[in-house]
Image (spheres, rainbow, N blue to C red):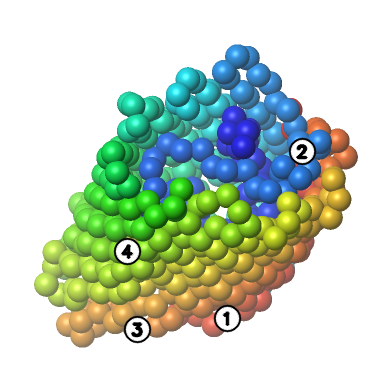
Amino acid sequence: MNTSMSLFYRAFGLTLLLLPVCGYAQVVDQYFPAMGTGAGELSEEPAQIRATQAYQPLGARWGPLSVHADGAEGIGYSSNVDLLPQTIHRSASIDTQGHVGVVAMFEHDNQAHADISVDDTRYPSRSLQNRTTWNASVGATHHFGRDELGVSFTHLSLVQMPTESGALILVGPVPYNLDDGRISYLIQTHGRISFIPEINVQHYYFGTPSIVNNPLTYVNQSYRDRVIVNEGFTARYEILKNSHLLFLARGTQISYGSAQISSSSSDQGFPTRNSNGFSVLGGYDSNEAGPIRFRAVVGYQLRAYSAALYERVTSPIAEASLRWEPTRLTSAVVSVTHGIEDSAFESVLGYTNTQAQLTVTHAFARNIVFGFHSEVRQASYPSTSSKLAGTPIYQQAHNQNMYGFGINGTFYLNRHISLSLSYDYSSQSAYLGPMFPVHVVQGVVHFAL
């Protein structure tokens, strides 16, 4: 595997094959490693990249340093840009993307990398939905003998739409930022057992979106700001080379800021939504070279709130993925996640989120790649105490559902220029709302160094 190129292909492949599906659910999930894996690692390039190697950009290299840069310009159409069922606004779209990735490989498999991506979307018929999002990350691993230290930091500047799980329902995107820092240390014993202690800190902070019927009015979103601290410990037992039995334990603390839910709520004494939780999981990770790779961890999760009015939330927790590569030209990846999500806005406290994704890619020829992806999701919101009925923080028991699929094709003209065409369909709902369909078509010209 050419690890110096894999950071570029992670962003490149994700943009062309997975981006439409990722917008449906918890968008931040795609940026972070699976539970029980170390921080700062590089991802593995897919089989289709190896199969179409003659058409992949080479980037620039200076000794141990590799730089890859690419950009894309897309023109498309969406049948519902607001993602709300009440009033349908259709619009063409113009999407501009840019990405730069840098990887430095050193002796003893030590590495450092940095990555930044920018995405600007304009809707000529619905300028309210215009948005610019970006993300940047740095990471590194360093070996101390057989042990490995991993560190990473990621900044995400994104927007939240009404159909995301637990999202605030506003006409217009809700801007927010997330800073994520991780550190882990892989401890190798002289036998088959290894350990990975780790800590992860996340800071969410939200912007102030305008309301469409009164551009001078803003909703104060600072009450959603929160810090999440996860302490994790993973024990691994190697059965075969690169295949392990896993045991994971993780503690979680969520602390909200002191901001009130609204300007009129300061004297209403709403209880804090701070919480503590833990999860215990066991599973198996089969990462041997071969056509099938499998990873699954399953366990139990609990979240307890500081305020007695909020009942505990308990749930099974699971994270599983199956990659099947029957040939060098075709791969299929199935992933399933289930667990408790943290509070999102005043009417949503803890809830459980379940989602499953399928992605199939096939290299039809050396310069032609086809893809198919689908997703189903359900967010289950439990009801809060009846004592909170009539207040902004009362939550009704409710399920929010979504399913969708998409197809795409990419034609590589040469190492530097490619063309892609995609179609996506989804049927989804906002919180407490009905299901409604959305169709998206997009053509993209992609340029690479």
Give the CA separation, mark 1 to mark 4. Answer: 36 Å
Of discs 4 and 3, which sits in the foreground?
4
Q: Is residue 203 left or right of residue 296?
A: left
Provide residue 410's location: percent of width, then percent of height: 80, 50
Provide residue 208's location: percent of width, then percent of height: 42, 51
Q: Which residue is mark 4?
A: 282
Provide residue 39's location: percent of width, then percent of height: 39, 40
**Circle 3 — which element?**
loop
Residues under numbered marks 4 and 3 in contact, where contact means CB atoms less than 8 Å apart: no
Q: Which residue is mark 2?
A: 53
For residue 386, what is the image quadrant?
A: bottom left
- Quadrant of the drawing holding the N terminus: top right
Give the CA separation, mark 4 to mark 3. Answer: 30 Å
Q: Which residue is mark 1?
A: 435
Which of the two residues, 239 or 98, is positioned nearer the viewer here? 239
Residue 348 in sight here: no
Residues under numbered marks 3 and 1 in contact, where contact means CB atoms less than 8 Å apart: no
Q: Which mark is residue 397?
A: 3
Q: Residue at x 81, y 37 (%)?
A: 55
Give the CA separation, mark 4 to mark 2. Answer: 38 Å
Of discs 1 and 4, which sits in the foreground?
4
**Residue type of the residue flagged with mark 4:** Gly
Give the CA separation, mark 3 to mark 1. Answer: 17 Å
Q: Earlier in the sequence, mark 1 or mark 4?
A: 4
Q: Residue at x 32, y 73 (%)?
A: 316
Provide residue 26's location: percent of width, then percent of height: 47, 60
Taking the view exactly as shown, the residue that stands out farthest to the top is: 63
**Residue type of the residue flagged with mark 1:** Met
Question: 10 Å neighbourhood of mark 4: few (<14), some, or many (≥20)?
Answer: some
Q: Earlier in the sequence, mark 4 or mark 3?
A: 4
Q: Earlier in the sequence, mark 1 or mark 2?
A: 2
**Circle 4 — which element?**
strand
